[in-house]
Image (cartoon, helix red, strand yellow):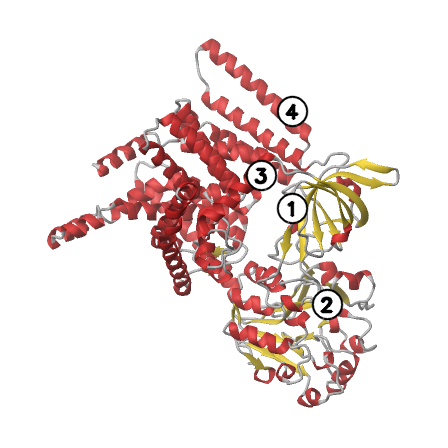
Amino acid sequence: MDQIQRKLAEIDRRLGASPAGYFKQIISTAPLLFCAIGLMGGIIVQNFAAMSVWVWLTMLGLCAVTIAVLYVRTQNTGTYAPVLLSTCALVCFVCVGAIRLASFYRASENDISTLVGGERRLATIRGLIVSQPYADSNQDWAFAKYKFADSGSSFYLRVQEAETTAGWAKAGGTIRVQVDEAVTDLQPGDYVQLYCWLEGFQGATNPGQFDIREYLARKGVTVGASVKTRDGIELLQNKPVGIFAKIKARLRQAAVQALVGERYPNEESEKLLLALVLGYRANIDKTTLEAFRRTGLLHFICLSGMNFGILIGIVWWVCKTVGLMKPARAAVCMITAVMFLSVVPENAPAFRAAIICFAFCGSILFRRQVNPFNSLALAAVVLLLIRPTELFEADWQLSFASVLGILTLCPRFYTIIREKTVEHPWLAVFMKVKNRPFLIRIVERPEPYAMFSTSLAAWSASAGILLYQFGTIQPMTSIWTVIVSPLIGVISVAGYVKLVLAMFVPNIANVMDNLIMPFSDLLIWVVKFLASIDETQMLIGQVPAALIILYYGLIAFAAFAYFRRPMPKRVICTVIIIFITMWIGIIKWERAGRNDLAISVLDVGHGQAIVAQLPGTTNILFDAGSLTGSDIGRRIVVPFLQYNGISRINVCFVSHNDTDHINGVPEIAEYCKVGGVYANEEFFDQTDQWGTAKFFKDQMRKRGVEVRPSRAFPAPDSSAIVKILWPSKDVYENEEVGENDKSSVCLIEFAGRKVLLCSDIEEAAQQELLRLYPDLRADIVIVPHHGSARTLEANFLEALSPDIIISSCGDSAIEKGLVVAPGGNTREFYTARDGAITVRVDRSGKIEAEGFVRK
C-alpha cells in the first residue's frame, strides 16, 4: 500500500511538474516563499551594489502602484493574474530587503562611530552594559602560561553619553569593550563610565583568518573600546535586574541543575548532555569537539530544530495523554517553546525553530492548514527583517539550507532508496528463496531508510555551503548520522524527560543518570572511533563562488526539472556532476602538486610564521609563534593552511626556542598532520633558562610528534633545495654567543633564485655569516630579528643585494620607526603594514610578491 501511495504521489507531482505548475502550487500553498526570496535577493544586491535608498523607495512605490492597479483590474474583470501579482510582490520585497540592509548599516548622527572616525582616540564615555562580561581565557592554548599579560574580559556596551570639549553630549551605538584583566563584578544592566581608547576593528590580515571587523559589523558593532585595567571602569548605577531577566536567569539555572545537578559539569558525558539538550557546548573537551567536527556530526551538539522537535513532541504527547484537545495542546506547546527559547543560547537555528513552532501551533488555534515551506519562509522573513546581515553568516545559511533540503529532497531520496533496495526484484527473490520472515521484517522497516534519506537530504543541501565556507567535503556524514542517531535520540529524549521530571519528582530524575550517562559515554566513544577511521574527509580549500552556484543549480534542476523521458535529464545531471567533480579535482590537484615555489610570511604580530610550499607536494613550516598575539597556531596558521587546502606539513623547522617562534606549533599539530619537527641544537642543550625548549618537546610528544635535531633535517622531495647555513656546532658550544645569534638561518634555492630566512640573528652572527659565505647573495631576504634596525649589521643587506626584503614585525615597531627601511630599488614589505606577504617564484625564475592587505 505504501508503494502504491508513493506512485500516485509521484504521478501527481509529474502532472504539475512544469514551471507554471510549480508557480501555481507555490502561490496557493506557500506564498511567503516569494517574500523570503525577494528579501534575500534585495539584501544581496544592496550588499554588493550599495545603491541609494531613494532608488529602492522609488522602485517600491512603483511596485505598490502596479499591485494596486492589477488588483483593481482583476476585481473588475473577474480574472486573476497570479504571475504578475506574485512577481510584483517579489520585487517589492527585493526593495524592502535592500532598504532594510541600508538602514541597518546607516549610523545615526550622534553614533559613537562618528566620534572615532578613522583614528584611535582617547575618550570618556557612559553607557549600559548589555552582555555578561566574558573571560577571554586561553585554557586550550599550550603556551598560555608563558604569556606575560593576564587573561582579559570583554562585554558589549550601549553608549548613551560621551564627554566632549563642551561637556557631556548624547551618543548612541553599541561598542565592544575589551579589558586587559578579569572583570567579575559587573553585570548586564549596570550603568558605567569608561576611560578608554576608541578605535575601529582591524580586519583579517591573513588568508583564511576570521575577520572580526566584518563579523561585528554584521551585528551593528563598528567601534571597540580598550581599557587597561578594571580601575578604568567606574560603576555609576547598579541597575536592578528586571523581572524578565530574573525569570530567564532562573530558568537557565534550573534547566542546567535539572540535567547535571548543582555541581559544575566535570565529566565529559555531562558536558555532552548539556550540549545535546540545551545547546551549551563551550565546556566540551576539544578532542571530543574535534571528533564531532571531523565526522560532520557537529550539528548534533549545536542547538537546532531537532531540539525543539523532540521537546515539543514530548509535550504534545503528554498533553494528548492527559486528554487535552488540540487547541489546548498548541497553547501549551507555545508556552513551552517560549520557556525553552529563554533557556537555550540565542542563535539563528533556535529562533527559526521557534517561529516554525509558533506557526504550526497558530495554525491549529486559528484552524488553518499549515505548510512547512510557508513556515520556513516566515522564519526567514522575520529573522532577516530583525537583522538582515544574518544572511551572510554560515550558521544561518546551514540552518535554513538543511531544513529546505529535508523538505524538498528527503521524500524523493526515500522513494529512490526504497525502490533500489527493499523493493528491488532481486531482493524479493532472495528473501523468498531464503524464506526468512524475521529478516524480511527487519529489512522492510522504514525507519532506517527514512533516517538515511533525511541525513542525505540535509547533507546534500548543506554540502555546497560547507565547501564554500570551510573548504571541506565530508562524504561519510550521512552514514555516520544513521549510526549515531539512535544514541542521539535516546540521550535527547531522556534528557528532556529528565528536565520535566526534575520539576515534579526530582528523585526519579536523579535515577535517570544511570540510564543517560552510559549512553553519553558510548556516544563519545563511537564518534571518536568513527573520526579515527574516517579518512574520506577532503580538504579542498577556498573555491570560487561559481562552483557553488553550479552545484545548487544542479540540485534545483534535479529536483524540479521534468522531462517526459528520464534519459535526457539523467544525461544532463551526469554531465554536470562530472564537470563539478573535475573542477574540484583540478583545484585539489593544483594545490597538492605545484610547479612553482610559494613562500608566505604570515602576519602574527611580533613573531614569525613562514609557510613554504615547495614545487611538488612538500610543505615546510618555518617557526610559528608570536609575542603579541595569543594562540596564533589555531587562529592564524591553521586557517591559512585550510584556506589553501594544505592538510599536511611535511616538515616543521624551528629556528630557536624563543616563544615568539614556537608557541603556535602544538596547536598546528592538533589540526594538521605534521611529518616531523626539527629544531636547532639549542633545544637539546641542558641550559634551558626558561624551560621553553623542554616544555615544547613535551607538548609535541603528547601530540605524537617527536622533536629531532636539525642535523637530521631531511632533504625535501622537491626540485627546490633547502640548506641550513647557520649556526655550526662550535657556535652552540660557545657560551659567549648570544641566544639570538644561535638561531638557525636557512636558504631556499629554486630556478636560480635564493630566499634567505634569517630568524633572529644579530650583528655578530650576521658578520660571521658574511665571513663564512662571502659570495652569498639572496633575491629575497626575511630580515633578521623581525626587521629590527637596531640589531642589523650596517652592510648586511647591502652585501646580500636582495630585490625584496620582508620584515615579520608588530604594529609598534612600525609606529616607532624601529624597522629597517632600505633605499634603492629594493622592495620592502612589513607584515604589520601589508598583512601576510606571499612571494612566488616560477620555473623561469620570475618573482611575484604581494601583501594580503595594506593597513
The location of residue 332, given as percent across then percent down, is 42, 31
In the image, 242: left or right of 466? Answer: right
Q: Earlier in the sequence, mark 4 or mark 2?
A: 4
How many numbered discs, if any? 4
In the image, 119: left or right of 138? Answer: right
Question: Image point 77% across, 37% down: which residue?
Answer: 171
Q: Is residue 656 above or below residue 444?
A: below
Which quadrant, please, contains the C terminus? bottom right
Q: Disc 4 residue type? A: Thr
Q: Which mark is residue 806?
A: 2
In the image, 199: left or right of 310? Answer: right
* Pointers 1 and 2 in contact (C-beta within 8 Å): no
How far is the residue under mark 1 from the one under mark 2?
A: 31 Å
Q: Disc 1 residue type? A: Leu
Q: Disc 2 residue type? A: Ile
Q: Mark 1 Cα within 10 Å, few/some/many (few <14, many 20+)?
A: some
Q: Nearer the viewer, residue 720 or 220?
A: 220
Q: Which residue is mark 1?
A: 216
Q: Nearer the viewer, mark 4 or mark 1?
A: 1
How far is the residue under mark 4 from the one under mark 1?
A: 31 Å
Q: Which mark is residue 58?
A: 4
Q: Nearer the viewer, mark 1 or mark 2?
A: 1
Q: Earlier in the sequence, mark 4 or mark 1?
A: 4
Question: Image point 58% across, 35% down: which residue?
Answer: 244
